Image (cartoon, helix red, strand yellow):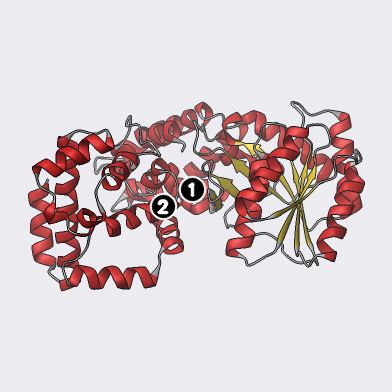
Amino acid sequence: MFDNLSEKLDKALHVLKGHGQITEINVAETLKEVRRALLDADVNFKIAKEFTNKVKEKALGQNVLTSLQPGQLMVKLVKDELTQLMGGDAEELDLTGSPTIILMSGLQGSGKTTFSGKLANYLKSKKNKKPLLVACDVYRPAAIDQLHVVGEQIGVEVYSDRENNDPVSLAKAGVKHANENGLNVVIIDTAGRLAVDEQMMNEISNIHKALNPQETLFVVDAMTGQDAVNTAKVFNDVLNFDGVILTKLDGDTRGGAAISIKSVVNKPIKFIGTGEKMEAIDVFYPSRMADRILGMGDVVSLVERAQEQFDEEQARKIQKKIAKNRFGFDDFLSQIQQIKKMGNMKDLMGMIPGAGKALKGLDIDDDAFKHIEAIIHSMTPDERSNPSKINSSRKKRIAMGSGRTVQDVNQLMKQFEQMSKMMKMMQGGGGKKMMQMMQNMR
C-alpha cells in the first residue's frame, strides 16, 4: 500500500538520511519535495503545505542542523507529524448499548456491504460478540443476496425482509429481532448511491435519528483519493459520524484519503480493509501506518497477526517432531496454511522493514504457495511423512501429478531440507551453526 508515496518520500529524504552537511537550504528543498510527494498522492494542497510548514518549524526549533544525526531526527519529525495528521492514537469502537447499534454509511461501490461482514466477523472472533447483520438496502436485491452470502460465510445471522421497502422500519425490526434472540451487536447495512443525492442523505439521516446508534461509520474506497475526503465531509455534515473505514488499501492506493481525511472532518479512521478475505480487517494505528509510508515496516502488526494464527498445541507437537527428526511435509503444509491466514502476501511483506523497497516491481501473488501445495498434495501420505524416501522416479511422478517440473520438486525438497535444519538448530540452541548456514545459503 502507498508504494508510490513511500518511494517519493524516500527520495525526498534521501539527502538528509546521509551524513553529509545539512543546511537550512537543503532542509527547505527536501520539504519542498515532501510536499510535492503528498500532492502527487492526492493530499489537499492546503494540508500538504501546513504539514511541511510544521515539520520545518519543529526542525529549526529542535536544532536539527546541529544534531549528531540530523537526517534521522528529520525523518522522525516527518513520521511524528504524519502520525498526528492521521489521528495520533488508534480509536476502537464504542461497544456499549444493549444491543450495540452500528450504522454503516457510504457510496455504492465503496465496499460497505463486504466490510459490514468483515466487521461482524471481527466482533465475533476477537471481541466475543454475537452480531446480527441487517440488510436495509431496499433498492438492490443483489445487495441483500450479497449480505446473506457474507453472513453464511462467517456464520453470522442476517435479518432481511424483501416485502418491506421502508429502510427505517426495517432497521427497527432488525434491532427488535436482535433483542428477542440474544444478539448484542446490530450492524445496519444501508443503501448507497453512485453519487451523493438528497434522497439518500434524508434516508440515512432518518435511520440515524430513529436508532440513535452507538457508532455511525463512513465507509470509503481508499483508491478514490481527494474525492473520498470531499464525500466524507458531505456525510459528516448530515450524520456527524463517529469514524471512518478505509477499504481497498491492498489496491493501487495513492494515500491522499488516509493522510488528509482526519484533518478535514476531524473524525478518526477506525478500521482499514486490506484484502478480499473476511479476516482482512485491521484496527487503524496512525503511528504504524506512518512507519509503513516511510518504508520502516510494521513489525508490531506482523507479530500480532502471527500470534492470532499461532496454535500452541500444534507448535508443541511440531517441536517434538523436530527433536525426533520426524518433521514432514504435512507439518510444512500446516505452517503454510497458518501464514496464508495472516493476510495477502504483498501486505505482509510490506510490514517487514525495508522489504517494500527491496521487492519493488515484483508481483507477489496471493497464490504464491499454490504450486508448493500442489507438489505436496501429489505425494503419498508415506512420502509426506518420510521425505527421504522420495527418489528420482518418485520425483517424476510427483511432478507429473502436480503439473510442475522435476526441477520445481527438487527446489522444494532443498528448501524443505534447509528449513528443517534451521528449525533443529534453533531448537538445539545452535545459533553459531545457524548463522554459518544462513551465510552459505546466500
Residue 223 in the image, given as x and y percentages of width and height: 57, 31
Residue 96 in the image, given as x and y percentages of width and height: 75, 67
Badge 1 crowding class, 10 Å Cα cut-off, few under 14, some 14 to 19, many 20 or more, is many
Q: Quadrant of residue 178?
A: bottom right
Q: Determine whether, in the image, residue 204 is placed left or right of residue 71.
A: right
Badge 2 crowding class, 10 Å Cα cut-off, few under 14, some 14 to 19, many 20 or more, is many
Question: Are the residues at dot 2 and dot 1 in contact (C-beta closer than 8 Å)?
Answer: yes
In front of the other: 149 or 132: 149
- Residue occupying image coordinates x 63% and y 30%: 226
The residue where tag 1 is placed is 289
Is residue 218 visible to us here?
Answer: yes
Q: Is residue 38 above or below residue 439?
A: above
Residue 55 in the image, given as x and y percentages of width and height: 49, 44
Q: Is residue 278 above or below residue 420?
A: above
Q: Is residue 242 above or below residue 33?
A: below
Q: Quadrant of residue 222?
A: top right
The residue where tag 2 is placed is 298
- Residue occupying image coordinates x 88% and y 31%: 199
Q: Provide the secondary structure element on which disc 2 rests.
A: loop
- Residue occupying image coordinates x 24% and y 73%: 320
Q: Quadrant of residue 201?
A: top right
Q: Provide the secondary structure element on which disc 1 rests.
A: helix
Residue type highlighted by circle 2: Asp
Residue type highlighted by circle 1: Met
